[in-house]
Structures are given as structure tokens and as C-alpha cells.
Image (tube, rainbow, N blue to C red):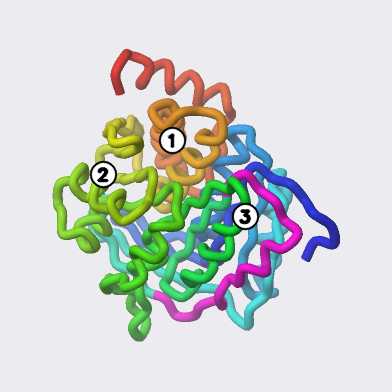
Amino acid sequence: MPTSSKHYDVIFAGNYTKDTIITPDGTRNVDGGGMNYAAHAGARLGIKAAVVTRLAREDEHVVEAIRSSGIDCYPFYSPASTLMTLEYKTHDVDKRNLYVTSTAETIQPEYLDGLDAKAITVSPSIRGEVEPEFFEAMRKRNGVILAADVQGFVRVLRGEALVYEPWEDMERVLQNLNILKSDAVEAQFLTGESDIEKAAKFYAELGAKEIVLTHSAGVLIHADGKFHHYKFHSQSMAGRSGRGDTCLGSYTSMRLSLPPVEAGKWAAAATSLKVERPGPFDRPLGEVKDFIRQHYDHGSA
């Protein structure tokens, strides 16, 4: 815990996950966690980032890896880390099976005491990792932008399987959010809408001011009553795990200085490039700028 106040552009909160990823191309083990992917995206795009996370002491190497990337990390230790298996039976990134054999514990609001930020991005993996009271506590911070990924609330651990279940606290959380991230599968489950624009509008009517909604072909940004669509332009899907986390991390980071329609371009570009490589986003800023000029600067998104 810091002894004096430290200032950041964005704090990324969420538990580390030790991931086993199974795809038609093979099996590999990676250090995951939404906060990990999101924070690396933000840091690569030039913001001052910090991570607040929970994990087992035996996974201390993760903390050092985050710090070696220029991201401050504040770990809180649990008896076990979250151990997750992600199984993709096909090349469709929206369809996967999730299994968990152990979990880290809940991230408490007081873990951010002494840490100031322009934005706080919450990227949990499982319901219970971050509770609704966390957002109510953070909302009391003057002017802070609050962002969250719906995956950590719709996914519930039953035995070792992660399954979707109705989210009774959805409106309670969304009314405290500036930015909500969802994918198309989660959106259809929670809103009943297969049309992503209708699903985004449903989320917005519950209180979230801006919606970042990913799908297999791209990302939709809904803000100020307008819809902005961006296609992904990836050359491969080798790094599909962490796609949504990268999208949320880059969007939130760029929203500190850009309007939604421009921040959406950065999010789409960073996500397209990330999906080509396993692990957290590692492309240089200039490459992202070139990608935007090539694919998204042709007038209307």
C-alpha cells in the first residue's frame, strides 16, 4: 500500500489469471487477467498506468513483469491465484468454454486508498471479484471516469465451469459507470437483443454513458446517442485472448484526451494489432498511428 498519494491517468483493477488457452492450433499457458491486457494497452498508448490486483505469492513474477513494462503494480495476496482454462473449439473468437479450478479473493475499495487517477478501469473475470459497493465508493471521487467490463459480472462459477447467469445488480452498477464494455454474446444474454445497436442502447438506458461493444468483426461505440462502427483488420487471430480487455483499456485511455469517435479508432486499431500476437499488447505507438491512417481515416467510421 502506498504511504503517500500517487497520481495516474488510469488505474486498472482486476485479478490476475493464470490461463491455459486451448485452440484448434494447440495449447499454451499465459499470464492473463483483464487488468493485465488493459494496462499494457494503455501504457503503450502513452498514459501513466497502475494496476491493482490479487494473486498468490507464488506468482510474484507477474508483478515484476508488469512493473518492467513501466506500469506501477499494487498486489494484494490471496491463498491462490485464479486458474482459468479457455477453450476455443473453433476459430470464432466469440465462442469459448471457460473453466476455473481456483480463484483469488475480492478487490476491496480501500486497496485504492492513496492512489489518484483520472479514470479507473475495472476488468474482473468472475462475479464476486469486484462487488457493486466498489463502484459506489469510487463514484465519490470527484470527476473520475469509471469503466468496467461486464464479463466479470455475468460470468458465475458453478463447480469448475463458468456459466452466464442473470445480473441482478446490473442497473445498480451501470448507473455509476461512464464506460461499459461488453461483447456481443454477453450483450444478447443480458439485454435479450441480438442487434448490437439495440443492445448498446439498452445498456445506456440503464445508466452507462458510453458503451464499447465488441463482436467478431469489430467494435461498436455508443456515446451521446450516436453509434460509431469500426471493423477489426487483423492478419491473424493468434492472440485472441485479451481482445476485449485491450479494447476497453485503449478506449478508456484515449478518452482522457479525445472524443468517443476518435477514441474508438484507437481502440479498434490497438485491438486489431493485439489479436495478431499472444500476450499483452506490445506494439509501438507509431505503428498504431500508421494503422489508424491506413484503415480508419477515410471519413466516416
Identity of the residue drawn at 37% across and 61% down = 151
According to the picture, the residue beneath numbered tag 3 turns out to be: 141
**In the image, is residue 41 above or below residue 85?**
above
In the image, residue 179 lies at what x, y percent? 43, 47
Q: Tell which circle, 3 or 2, labels the residue nearer the N-terminal end.
A: 3
Mark 3 and mark 2: Cα distance apart in space: 35 Å
The disc at residue 147 is none
Was residue 22 drawn as part of the magenta stretch in this picture?
no
In the picture as drawn, the residue positioned furthest to the bottom comes out as 159
**In the image, is residue 278 above or below residue 106?**
above
- In the image, taking residue 216 as reference, residue 244 lies left or right, namely right
Mark 1 vs mark 2, foreground winner is 1
User: The disc labelled 3 sits on which kind of residue?
Assistant: Arg
Mark 1 vs mark 3, foreground winner is 3
Where, quadrant-wise, is the C terminus in this rendering? top left
User: Which is nearer the eye, 61 or 105?
Assistant: 105
User: The disc labelled 1 sits on which kind of residue?
Assistant: Ala
Mark 1 and mark 3: Cα distance apart in space: 26 Å
User: Which is nearer the eye, 297 or 258?
Assistant: 258
- In the image, taking residue 239 as reference, residue 61 lies left or right, namely right
Asked if the residue at tag 3 contacts the one at tag 1, i.e. Cβ–Cβ closer than 8 Å, the answer is: no
**In the image, is residue 230 above or below residue 53?**
above
User: The disc labelled 2 sits on which kind of residue?
Assistant: Ser
**Badge 2: how crowded within 10 Å, few (<14), some, or many (20+)?**
some
**Badge 1: how crowded within 10 Å, few (<14), some, or many (20+)?**
many
According to the picture, the residue beneath numbered tag 1 turns out to be: 267
The disc at residue 216 is 2
Mark 3 vs mark 2, foreground winner is 3
> What secondary structure is found at the residue carrying circle 2?
loop
Asked if the residue at tag 2 contacts the one at tag 3, i.e. Cβ–Cβ closer than 8 Å, the answer is: no
- In the image, taking residue 76 as reference, residue 203 lies left or right, namely left
